[in-house]
Image (cartoon, helix red, strand yellow):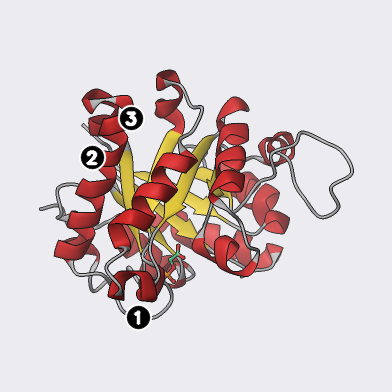
Amino acid sequence: MRKPLIAANWKMHKTIPEAVDYVKRFVPAVRNAADVDILIAPPFTAISAVAGALRTAQRADIFVAAQDVFYEEKGAYTGEVSTGMIKDAGCSFAIAGHSERRQYFHETDSLVNKKARAAVRAGLGVIICVGETLEERNTGRTFDVVKRQVSEALLEFEEADFGNIVFAYEPVWAIGTGVTATPDQAEEAHVFIRSVIKEIYGGEIAGDVRILYGGSVKPENVDEIMACPDVDGALVGGASLDPESFSRLVMFKKG
Ligand code: PGA
């Protein structure tokens, strides 16, 4: 069985005091959440403080993730942050290939693959983001694009790595726009992603890998999205910034 994972991607939001205050309000709000993994991806500057606040609140089981990570371990790469550094700061996960990285920083499938491999090699979990733009959807290229992104992201992985790999299907047209994919659109894409993984790594791995949906998930639509059989969680931007709203997502109503 795939345990649901509800993940907060704060993007470029929150100072250290704001992040610590969030944790203090969030932890009591999810004390009754059961059978769900929770993850928070703060900006780099707040990772250590969030991990510390979670330890203080005795919720070190809530995963802390970096929103991005570089693939080299050290060296002259001004501005980059390595897997060892994010682990040191308290992360057990990294996100790779978020569409905003692909769009604004020109990250390619091959770069996303390098980052994902570096994360897994370092013993981190990785959330690999894929998804089509509106133009790609409107011109009938959704499945081609998603297939390319998934297969290239998975180059040179081994079966044993899959315990640390999570996918997020995030149609770019649904991110931050208030437009959510319908449950049917989400389910169709998730089934497709699972079939691509099955073609490469076989049915057992494809059946076990968690695939999150991302794109304008909010309290009003989380239950119907989570009711889709192939949706194993959510990667949430805007609605994760408020601890009450994110706690409602974590406490989604099951089936
Ligand atoms: P959103 O962002 O929930 O604000 O649409 C999702 C994401 O980018 O991961």
How many tags in the picture? 3
Query: What residue do we see at 69% from left, 68% from top?
Result: 15
Residue type highlighted by circle 2: Ser
Which tag, 1 or 3, sits closer to the chain's start?
1
Q: Secondary structure at mark 1?
A: loop
Name above or below for residue 186 compared with residue 113.
Answer: below
Judged from this view, the residue extending furthest toward the right is: 76
**Is residue 171 left or right of 54 when viewed as pictured?**
left
Label 2 environment density (alpha carbons within 10 Å; few <14, some 14–19, many ≥20): some
Percent coordinates x, y for residue 36 in the rendering: 31, 43
* Pair 1/2: label in front: 2
Residue in the foreground of this view, choosing between 120 and 108: 108
The quarter of the picture where the N terminus appears is top left
Query: What residue do we see at 61% from left, 56% from top?
Result: 107
How far is the residue under mark 1 from the one under mark 3?
34 Å
Q: Residue 195 bears which disc, if any?
A: 2
Residue in the foreground of this view, choosing between 22 and 177: 177
Q: Residue 200 bears which disc, if any?
A: 3
- Whether residue 40 appears in this view of the structure is yes
Residue type highlighted by circle 1: Gly
**Is residue 99 left or right of 204 when viewed as pictured?**
right
Q: Secondary structure at mark 3?
A: helix
Percent coordinates x, y for residue 157 in the rendering: 48, 27
Residue type highlighted by circle 3: Ile
Label 1 sits on residue: 178
